[in-house]
Amino acid sequence: MSPTVDAIDVGYLGLDRAAASFLVCAQGQPPILIECGTAACQPRLHRALDERGLRPADIAGLFVTHIHLDHAGGAGHFAAEGVPVYVHPFGVRHLADPSKLIASSRRVHGPSYDRFYGDPLPCPPQRLHATPDGTVMRIAGLRVTAIETPGHARHHHAWLVEEDHPAPSTASIHHSRHLFTGDVASMRVPGSEFISVPMPPPEFDLAAWRHSLDRLTAALRAGGETGETWTTLWLTHFGPILGGSGQALAHIAEARRRLDAEAELVRGLVEEQDRGLSDTEAVARYGAWLWPQAAQAGVSEAQRSAFLGPSFCRMNLHGVRRWRDQVAAAERAPG
Ligand SMILES: [Zn+2]
C-alpha cells in the first residue's frame, strides 16, 4: 500500500485553495502533517482534523517546508499538544522564539496581519527537531527525507515521503512517493495551471533556486520517470500535479522557465527604478507583463487581483532588489 495524502484547505487569506496542509498516512498508522498554515488558520485546520476523527495530539509529526507564516505559523499550536516539529536547522530558533518573525510579518502585512496571520505560539525547544539536508526519518510507517531547497528562502526543505519497507514492485503494484515542495516549485493560481513565482525579501536567491530545481529534478528521476515508482508533486499553493513523475518533471521545467523570465523582467524594472522609475510605474509595468499572460492561462480577473495584484508585484520587486544588492556587495567584498 502507498501512503494516502489528504490536502486540507486551511483558508489562508480567507480565500479558497490559497494554502494547504497535507495529512499523510501509511495504512494502519497515525498520520503526519506537512505544513500547517498561519496561526489564524488554526481553528479551521483543527475543525478539518476533527471532521476526520483526529485530535491535534494524534499527529505523529509535523513537517514544515520553511518558517514563513503561511507554512509554519501554527507549528506552536501543534507543539503545545506534544507533536514533534521537524524543520530546517536555520528555522529552529525562529519557531522557538517567533518574536522576530512576528515583528517582520507585522511590518510587511500591516493591517491585514491580525486577521490573516496572527501571532505564532513559541514551540517548546524539546518538540523542535532540526533536520539537516539528507536526513531520513522513519515515522509512523513512513520514510521522510529532507531535501534542502533554498532560493525562495534559505531555510527551505522539500519533503519526500514514501512508505517504509514497501513490498517489492510487481507489474501490478507500483509504489507511489509524494514530494512536498513548499514554495520551491512555485505556486499555481487556483483554478488554472498558471505558475506564479514568489520572490520575497530577504532571502530570494536566483542561483540557489535554480540549483534547488535541479535537485528536485534529480530526486524525481531517481524514482524513474515511468518505471516502478510514481512520484506526485504537491504544492502548498495549491495541491497535486497529477499524472505522476512525467508531469512532475514538466511542472519543474515550466517553473524554471517562469522563474528565469520573471526574475529577468523584475531585475530590469529594479534597474529602471534606480534611474527614477516610480514604485507605482514599476508595479504597472510588471502588471502589464504578467497579467495578460495569466489571463491567457485561464486566470480570472478576481483570481488575478487576489493572487497577482500590486502587493504580489511589490513583494517581488523588493525581493529581487535585495538579492541584487547582496550579490553586488558580495562581489565588492575583499577576498
Ligand atoms: Zn514562503
Image (cartoon, rainbow, N blue to C red):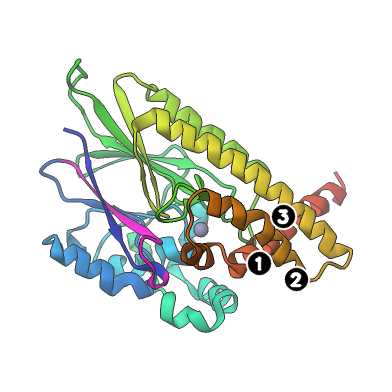
Q: Quadrant of residue 255?
A: top right
- Which residues, given as a range, are shown in magenta? 13-26
**x and y percentages locating residue 133 in the rendered image:** 48, 41
Residue 23 is one of the magenta-drawn residues: yes
Please state the horizontal and vertical placement of residue 287, each as a whole percent of the image.
66, 61
**Which residue sits furthest top?**
171
Which comes sooner in the sequence, label 1 or label 2? 2
N-terminal-most mark, 3 or 2: 3
User: Label 1 is placed on what type of residue?
Assistant: Arg
The Cα–Cα distance between marks 1 and 2, rounded to whole angstroms, is 8 Å
Name the amino acid, label 3: Val
Q: Is 322 on the left or on the right of 104, as rendered?
A: right
Q: Is residue 68 visible?
A: yes
Q: Position of residue 189 (x, y in %)?
A: 46, 55
Q: Earlier in the sequence, mark 3 or mark 1?
A: 3
Q: CA distance from mark 3 to mark 1?
A: 10 Å
Q: Are marks 1 and 2 in contact (CB under 8 Å)?
A: yes
Q: Secondary structure at mark 2?
A: helix
Q: Is residue 149 above or below residue 2?
A: below
Residue that carries the numbered disc 2 in the rendered image: 279
Q: Mark 2: which amino acid?
A: Asp
Ligand 1 within 8 Å of the CB at mark 2: no
Q: Give the vertical position of 211 relative to 331 (above or below).
A: above
The answer to whether 171 appears left or right of 86 in the picture is left
Residue lying at 47% horizontally and 71% vertically, measured from the top left: 97
- Residue marked by disc 3: 266
